[in-house]
Image: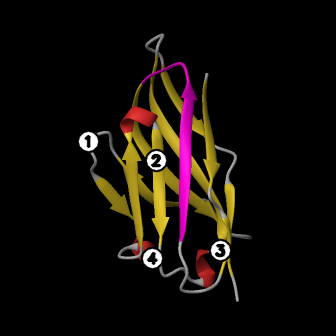
Amino acid sequence: QVQLVESGGGLVQPGGSLRLSCAASGSIFNINAMAWYHQAPGKQHELVARITSGGITNYTDSVKGRFTISRDNAKNTVYLQMNSLKPEDTAVYYCDADGLTRSYTSFGSWGRGTQVTVSS
């Protein structure tokens, strides 16, 4: 079993910054890609940013230049630095990871999410 726990969400004014963290724990052999998704009220789940084990990143167009995804492989943790936040960034942010367990079975796990609210 692999668990993901997000933290760092909250209420911030437009133009402000937040840093989200997501730590993976459990029977982990290695983690391939890690990603952040968000879901705004009444909208679909959407990929925000993704990072491979080798550090290759990709972002959805709406956050390019404002958000930065990074990871610490030693800590099995992925981060999302969010700058110049806009009200339309308001959503629940979820962490996702896939890889192999110590039993050499593949896993794909989701966290429970952390709320980000951008409002004055």
- Label 4: state its secondary structure: helix
For the C terminus, the image quarter is bottom right
Residue that appears at 59% across and 61% down: 38
Where is residue 114? Give x, y as percent.
Answer: 68, 56
Identity of the amino acid at label 2?
Answer: Val
Direction from residue 102 to residue 44 in the image, left or right: right
Residue that badge 3 annotates: 90
User: Is residue 19 within the magenta segment?
Assistant: yes
Which residue of the protein is positioned furthest toward the bottom in this rendering? 120
Residue 72 sits in which quadrant?
Answer: top left
Q: Alpha carbon of mark 3 to alpha carbon of mark 2: how far?
A: 20 Å
First of labels 3, 2 by sequence position: 2
> For the stretch drawn in magenta, what is the main secondary structure?
strand
Residue that badge 1 annotates: 54
How many numbered discs, if any?
Answer: 4
Front label number (4 vs 2): 2
Asked if 113 appears above or below 1 in the picture, the reply is below
Front label number (1 vs 2): 2
Q: Which residues are magenta?
A: 18-29
Direction from residue 25 to residue 11 in the image, left or right: right
Residue that badge 2 annotates: 78
